[in-house]
Image: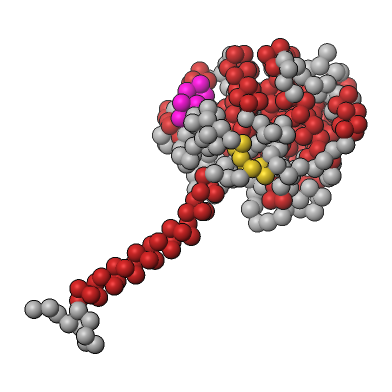
């Protein structure tokens, strides 16, 4: 006998109607979410740029130098990258991460790369301008916000502090010092930015208790919330301490306690990460390795630990993507997208710790995946198309740095 609900509807009919309604809701949900899923995995290219008149950019380039290597003969990538760094800096005097509206902010990390690129190519005024922005933006705590409005009016939102900013600031200052010709020039540089140096060192030492512990969890270059400390944050803080050692030595300031703290902190990092293959988080799987392993090595820090070098060499196995580039980390979402800041940063380390051939291969890959206007994009889709934002300060600067290292060597001052 067929059961009938009050009002004459059978149970079977009610079930069919309910199923149909659920199917319609599911279909509507798919129609709503599919375009967003597609956009996330296939981001369109936004190449909005700040135009720079030809004569102005030619004059600016002529005031410095563009690194060159024979393997890139015929390519304009390095020159175009320098032009883009200049264009991204022209309106505000300091570089924004990209010219698209949501990227038109000053990130301490991205700008540290720009400082190094400007200093290496003889554009010291531009490098110092960025250091001045960092020093003026830094509070007495020595801790930097994730990003700033480039007009100097402060942070644009509530992202909060990112601990690695203090490390990036010191590394950037050291990068300029390495390029100066004389001891007196270097000492004057340190004098001018002594407040930035002192505050940043104090912030790092406080966060790691003079090297005895890892710092508290803090977002890093992934720009995502974290509940556990990352290797990348630790590595950049160590890079800052190592850079500070050199800077204080140049200034004639004896800091034996700083060197001891940096040594302790390196041991703390190795004890926490080395046994698991230098994963993103302590105790994580080895396949989660990311740029943190690269930041332990030259030209960032200079870890001599063989396991750190091996972890960096092994990491592309987990980070490689279909188009031939790298994701931000081994456990990054499997969307097939390569990120050019990762590729360019690996090229930097390859030039110092790996092979010239490997560094050149990464540079050539970047060159092949530029936009039709010659810009380096942030992302490359699985089918090889440039995507997201172009140009990007981090990638452009890292390309210039890598070519300079291949031409003149790592950590070498201009003679």
User: Which residue is nearer to you in this view: 43 or 99?
Assistant: 43
- Across and down, in percent, residue 293 comes to 54, 28
What residue appears at the point 47 percent right and 34 percent down from the top-left corner?
330
| Residue 107 against residue 65 in the figure, above or below | below
Residue 191 magenta-drawn? no
Residue 316 magenta-drawn? yes
What residue appears at the point 65 percent right and 49 percent down from the top-left corner?
161
Q: Which residue lies furthest to the bottom in this view?
A: 7
Decide if residue 136 is on the left or right side of residue 11.
Answer: right
* Residue 37 visible: yes
Corner quadrant of residue 262: top right
What residue appears at the point 65 percent right and 56 percent down from the top-left corner?
158
Over which residues does the magenta segment extend? 312-318
Q: Report the predominant secondary structure element of the magenta stretch.
A: helix
What residue appears at the point 56 percent right and 32 percent down from the top-left corner?
384
- Across and down, in percent, residue 230 comes to 53, 39
């Amino acid at each position: 006998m067929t059961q009938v609900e009050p009002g004459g509807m059978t149970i079977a009919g009610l079930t069919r109607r309910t199923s149909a309604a659920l199917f319609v809701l599911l279909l509507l949900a798919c129609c709503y979410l599919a375009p967003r899923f597609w956009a996330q995995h296939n981001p369109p290219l936004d190449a909005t740029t700040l135009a720079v008149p030809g004569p102005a950019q030619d004059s600016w380039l002529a005031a410095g130098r563009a690194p060159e290597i024979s393997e890139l003969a015929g390519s304009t990538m390095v020159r175009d990258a320098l032009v883009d760094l200049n264009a991204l800096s022209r309106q505000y005097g300091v570089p924004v991460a990209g010219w698209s509206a949501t990227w038109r902010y000053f990130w301490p990390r991205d700008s540290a790369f720009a400082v190094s690129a400007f200093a290496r190519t003889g554009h010291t005024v531009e490098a110092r301008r960025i250091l001045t922005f960092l020093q003026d933006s830094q509070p007495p705590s020595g801790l930097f916000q994730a990003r700033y409005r480039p007009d100097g009016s402060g942070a644009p939102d509530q992202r909060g502090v990112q601990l690695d900013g203090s490390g990036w600031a010191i590394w950037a200052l050291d990068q300029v010092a390495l390029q100066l010709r004389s001891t007196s020039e270097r000492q004057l540089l340190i004098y001018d930015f002594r407040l930035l140096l002192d505050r940043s060192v104090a912030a790092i030492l406080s966060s790691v208790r003079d090297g005895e512990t890892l710092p508290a969890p803090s977002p890093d270059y992934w720009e995502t919330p974290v509940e556990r400390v990352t290797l990348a944050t630790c590595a950049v803080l160590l890079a800052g301490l190592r850079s500070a050692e050199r800077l204080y030595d140049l200034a004639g300031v004896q800091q034996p306690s700083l060197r001891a703290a940096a040594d302790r902190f390196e041991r703390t990092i190795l004890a926490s990460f080395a046994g698991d293959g230098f994963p993103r988080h302590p105790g994580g799987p080895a396949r989660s390795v990311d740029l943190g392993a690269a930041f332990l090595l030259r030209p960032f820090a200079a870890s001599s630990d063989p396991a750190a070098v091996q972890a960096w060499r092994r990491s592309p196995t987990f980070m490689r993507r279909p188009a031939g580039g790298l994701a931000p980390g081994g456990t990054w979402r499997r969307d097939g997208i390569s990120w050019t800041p990762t590729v360019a940063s690996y090229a930097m380390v390859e030039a110092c710790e790996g092979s010239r051939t490997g560094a050149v291969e990464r540079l050539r890959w970047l060159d092949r995946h530029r936009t039709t206007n010659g810009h380096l994009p942030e992302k490359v889709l699985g089918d090889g198309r440039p995507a997201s934002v172009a140009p990007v300060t981090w990638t452009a600067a890292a390309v210039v740095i890598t070519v300079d290292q291949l031409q003149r060597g790592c950590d070498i001052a201009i003679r």
